Amino acid sequence: MKTRDFIAAIRRSPEKQLIFENAQGALVHSGYHLTEIKATVYDTVDCGGQKNRWNENIFQLWVPDDAENDYLIAGKFVRIYDKVRGLVSLDEESEVRIEYGDDNFFPTTYHVSDLSETVDSLRFLLEPPSMTCKARDRRRAGKPESCCA
C-alpha cells in the first residue's frame, strides 16, 4: 500500500481505532505506541548486476510493559505523521511498512496489504516481506541478462 493511500484512509476516520492484524488473525496489542517514523532509501545492486533504488516509509509500533487497553486513535496517528512529515522527507508515493514484533509477530517490517472498516475501527492487514531474485524475475519477464543462478 502506498503511504498516500494509507494516510488518506486514516485521515477519513479520525475517531476510529487503528488495529493491525496478521493473516492468522493475531493483533498488534492494544496500547501500542507509534514510536518512530523512518524515511528509508534503498540503494542496491542485485545478482544480475543491476542497480535498484526505491523509497519506503516505515512506521514503528511498540507496546510498553504498562500498555493501556485502548488502541491508538486514527486522529492521533495522523497528528504524529503530520508533525514528522515536516521534519523528515517522507515520499508519499512510496510503500508504507509497519515495523513490529511480539509473541505473535516475528520482528520485521510488514507490508500493509488490505484495509477493512467497521463502525469504530480501521483494520489493516500486515503481511511479512518475501524474498525474490530480481534478475530472475526480469529474465522471466522477457528481459534477458546474466544472473547469479
Image (tube, rainbow, N blue to C red):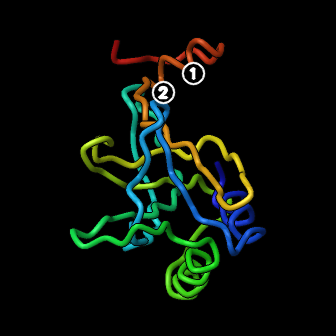
Q: Measured along the vertical axis of the image, is residue 125 above or below residue 10? A: above
Q: Which residue reaches farthest left?
A: 65
- Element carrying mark 2: helix
Give the labeled residue for mark 2.
134
Say which quarter of the image contains residue 41.
Answer: bottom left
Q: Residue at x 55, y 87 (%)?
A: 83
The x, y position of residue 88, in whole percent, is 50, 80
Q: Position of residue 107 (x, y in %)?
A: 28, 47
The residue under the point 58% across, 52% down is 95
Could you give the CA–CA distance between mark 2 and mark 1, rounded to whole angstroms? 6 Å
Q: Any mark on residue 138, and which?
A: 1
How packed mark 2 is, by other alpha carbons closer than 10 Å (few <14, some 14-19, many 20 or more), is some
Residue occupying the point 51% across, 61% down: 57
Image x and y of residue 75, in percent: 64, 78
- The answer to which image quadrant residue 19 occupies is bottom right
Look at label 1 and name its amino acid.
Answer: Arg
Q: Are marks 2 and 1 in contact (CB under 8 Å)?
A: yes
What is the x, y in percent for residue 50? 47, 35
